[in-house]
Each structure stands twice: as structure tokens, then as C-alpha cells.
Image: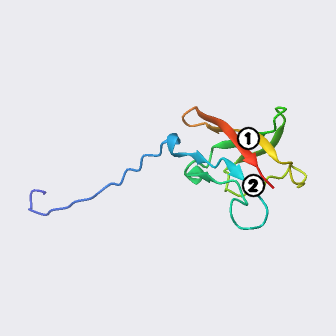
């Protein structure tokens, strides 16, 4: 309220984005049935600077993306389907230094 009696108000919405809300799927089954055909990382779109890397069991990088859009179908950089098996991911959020590591399985 100012000296003339005029009132004003405003509001602010604060959204807390915690890296712990990033939840990668453990299974990728790109077989065309529209179920787990792409690797889903829940809430990754909230972190557009996050870097997503996937490695095979020998430690070779098979996929890398910044601003991942949940669209990887288990293919190598040349587009060929990767074999079934265990793979390992690293998701790095540069703003906070948070790094999430884990495994996923490709089933065909």
C-alpha cells in the first residue's frame, strides 16, 4: 500500500529442480511395439545442459547427447542396432556438478 492508499501485489513461482528427479529407465527394447522403444530418462528435459553418455560392457562410448530428448533407440553412431546386453550410462549435470551413473539393458 502506498501513501495514497493504492494497493498492489505480485506473486513468484519458484520451481526447485533437483537432479535426484532424473530417473533413467533400466530397460530399452526397441522392437517396434511402442513400449520401451526409446530409452526414457524421466525429467531429463528439465536439464537441457545435461550430458548423457552410454557405454558398452567394454567401456566404449556407444551414444552421447546433450539436451537428450528421450529418443535413443539403442543404435550405434552409424545407426546400426546395438546387440542385446548390459550397457552403462553417465548423466552429468554441469550446473551442479551432479553425476548419475547406472546400467540399462537392451533387449531385442
Task: Please tell me the numbered disc located at residue 81.
Answer: none
Examine the rendered structure and indicate whether residue 41 appears above or below residue 6: above
x then y, percent, for residue 99: 61, 33
Please say whether residue 90 is visible from this viewpoint.
Answer: no
Question: Which of the 4 image quarters holds residue 95?
Answer: top right
Rendered view: 61 above or below 76: above
Q: Is residue 72 left or right of residue 41?
A: right
- Callout 2: SS: loop
Residue beneath the point at 78% across and 52% down: 107
Task: Look at the numbered discs 1 and 2 and tell me whether their residues touch, using CB distance below 8 Å.
Answer: no
Relative image position of residue 43 (x, y in whole percent): 55, 52
Q: Residue at x 83, y 52 (%)?
A: 75
> Is 62 displayed left or right of 18 in the figure?
right
Q: Which quadrant holds the N terminus?
A: bottom left
Is residue 6 left or right of 56 when viewed as pictured? left
The answer to whether residue 81 of the structure is visible from this angle is yes
Of 103 and 5, which appears nearest the observer? 103
| Residue 53's disc number | 1
Name the image quarter holding the C terminus. bottom right
Dot 2 corresponds to which residue? Answer: 72
Corner quadrant of residue 11: bottom left
Provide residue 2's location: percent of width, then percent of height. Answer: 13, 57
For the residue labelled by badge 1, is the local secondary structure a helix, a strand or a loop?
Answer: strand
Q: How many residues crowd mark 2 within 10 Å: few (<14), some (14–19), many (20+)?
A: some
Q: Nearer the viewer, residue 89 or 83?
A: 83
All told, the count of numbered labels is: 2
Q: Name the quadrant containing residue 61.
A: top right
108 relative to 104 in the view: left or right: right
Q: Position of residue 44 (x, y in %)?
A: 59, 50
| Residue ranking furthest to the bottom | 33
Q: Earlier in the sequence, mark 1 or mark 2?
A: 1
Amino acid at each position: 500500500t502506498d501513501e495514497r492508499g493504492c494497493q498492489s501485489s505480485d506473486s513468484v513461482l519458484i520451481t526447485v529442480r533437483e537432479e535426484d528427479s532424473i530417473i533413467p529407465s533400466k530397460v530399452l527394447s526397441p522392437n517396434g511395439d511402442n513400449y520401451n522403444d526409446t530409452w526414457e530418462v524421466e525429467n531429463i528435459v528439465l536439464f537441457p545442459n545435461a550430458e548423457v553418455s552410454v557405454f558398452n560392457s567394454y567401456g566404449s562410448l556407444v551414444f552421447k547427447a546433450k539436451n537428450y530428448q528421450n529418443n535413443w533407440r539403442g543404435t550405434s553412431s552409424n545407426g546400426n542396432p546395438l546387440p542385446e546386453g548390459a550397457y552403462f550410462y553417465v548423466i552429468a549435470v554441469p550446473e551442479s556438478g551432479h553425476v548419475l551413473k547406472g546400467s540399462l539393458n537392451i533387449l531385442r
